[in-house]
Image: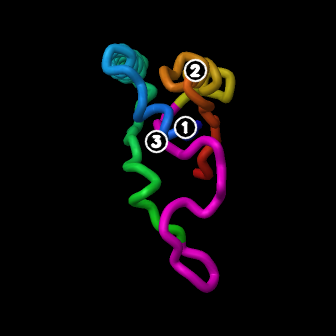
Amino acid sequence: MQVLLLMYQDEKAMQKLPREEYGKLHGAFMAYVDALKKARALVGNHGLRPTSEARTVGKDAVLDGPFAETKEQLAGYFLLEVPDMEAALGWAKRHPSAPYGAVEVRPVWT
């Protein structure tokens, strides 16, 4: 089955991380990606640019920025191929951004 791990983080708080902590987080992401590749679970992943560059298209308008007022913003995704939801949840629990926000696990229609 394919699942998306959707990373939600407080964008402003992440931008204020001390350089040392950001470096550790980056290293954790690289190790996480390597583990996913070794397990042959990674289909694709990307981080997203800041919400200040986002646009929302609705029924009657195009709005600057994200539409919903939320504490955390969608920061990126990982598309995984896993045997079942338990495996997906296992990867989500190991996700480096989990301590900084939330990781939503969403099955993909196939």
- CA distance for labels 1 and 3: 12 Å
Nearer to the camera, 39 or 61: 61
Query: Residue 82, which numbered label?
Result: none
Residue 16 falls in image quadrant:
top left
For disc 3, the marked residue is 76
Residue occupying image coordinates x 48% and y 21%: 96
**Spatial separation of the CA atoms under disc 2 and disc 1:** 11 Å
Q: Please say whether residue 73 is one of the residues in the magenta stretch.
A: yes
Q: Is residue 100 magenta?
A: no
Identity of the residue drawn at 60% across and 63% down: 67
Q: Quadrant of residue 30?
A: top left
Q: If you read the primary sequence from the N terminus, does the residue marked by circle 1 or circle 3 appear first?
A: 1
Q: Which residue is mark 2?
A: 99
Residue 67 visible in the current orientation: yes
Tell me: 49 left or right of 79: left
Query: Could you tell me if residue 2 is visible in this image?
Result: no
Q: Is residue 56 above or below residue 77?
A: below
Q: Secondary structure at mark 3?
A: strand
The three-letter code of the residue at mark 1 reads Asp
Residue 69: where, in percent of width, then height?
Answer: 65, 55
Q: Are marks 2 and 1 in contact (CB under 8 Å)?
A: no
- Mark 2 or mark 3: whose residue is earlier in sequence: 3
Residue tagged by mark 1?
10
Q: Which residues are magenta?
A: 57-81
Residue 70, placed above or below residue 29: below
Of labels 2 and 3, the one closer to you:
2
Q: Could you tell me the amino acid type at mark 3?
A: Gly
Most extreme residue toward the bottom is 60
Few, some or many residues within 10 Å of mark 2 (<14, 14–19, 20+): few
Q: Nearer the viewer, mark 1 or mark 3?
A: 1
